Amino acid sequence: MSTTWLEGMTEQLWGALDAFRSEVQAHGLLPMLEPVAPFNRPAFAAPVVTLGGLLALLLLSGVAITALGALLTALLALYVLLAQVFGFSVEMHPFGGR
């Protein structure tokens, strides 16, 4: 029995990694990319479904990166507005130091 939650999480992660490694050694990596049961019929459409899923993943990653860029741009504009127009200054000091 694990004594802390961190040890429990470590055991679970190692267990998942071992299961993944044994599955890859037994069947290879390619079956991991095939669609699951309701979406793998008919067999000739399975590569199309796989390609569609990978393209959707790529598209959504691009959307997430674009949203991150918009957030950083808005934060920069807010900083410039507060610092240059209203005269606020942002100072950061390490804890315990002066």
Image (cartoon, helix red, strand yellow):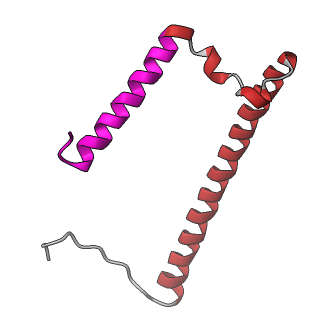
Q: Quadrant of residue 36?
A: top right
- The one of 42 and 94 positioned closer to us in this rendering: 42
Residue 28 spot, x, y in % from top left: 56, 11
Is 58 left, or right, of 79 in this rendering?
right
Q: Residue at x 26, y 46 (%)?
A: 6
Is 42 left, or right, of 82 in this rendering?
right
Is 88 left, or right, of 7 in this rendering?
right
User: From the viewer's perspective, is residue 23 above or below residue 68?
Assistant: above
User: From the viewer's perspective, is residue 53 above or below residue 28?
Assistant: below
Image quarter hosting the C terminus: bottom left
Residue 35 spot, x, y in % from top left: 72, 26
Query: Quick one: which residue is furthest to the bottom in this view?
Result: 86
The range drawn in magenta is: 1-25
Q: Main secondary structure of the magenta part?
A: helix
Is 56 left, or right, of 26 in this rendering?
right
Q: Residue at x 47, y 23 (%)?
A: 20
Q: Quadrant of residue 76?
A: bottom right
Q: Residue at x 26, y 49 (%)?
A: 5
Tell me if residue 15 is in the magenta stretch: yes
- The one of 23 and 81 positioned closer to us in this rendering: 23
Residue 24 spot, x, y in % from top left: 51, 15
Image quarter hosting the N terminus: top left
User: From the viewer's perspective, is residue 56 above or below residue 32?
Assistant: below
Tell me if residue 5 is in the magenta stretch: yes
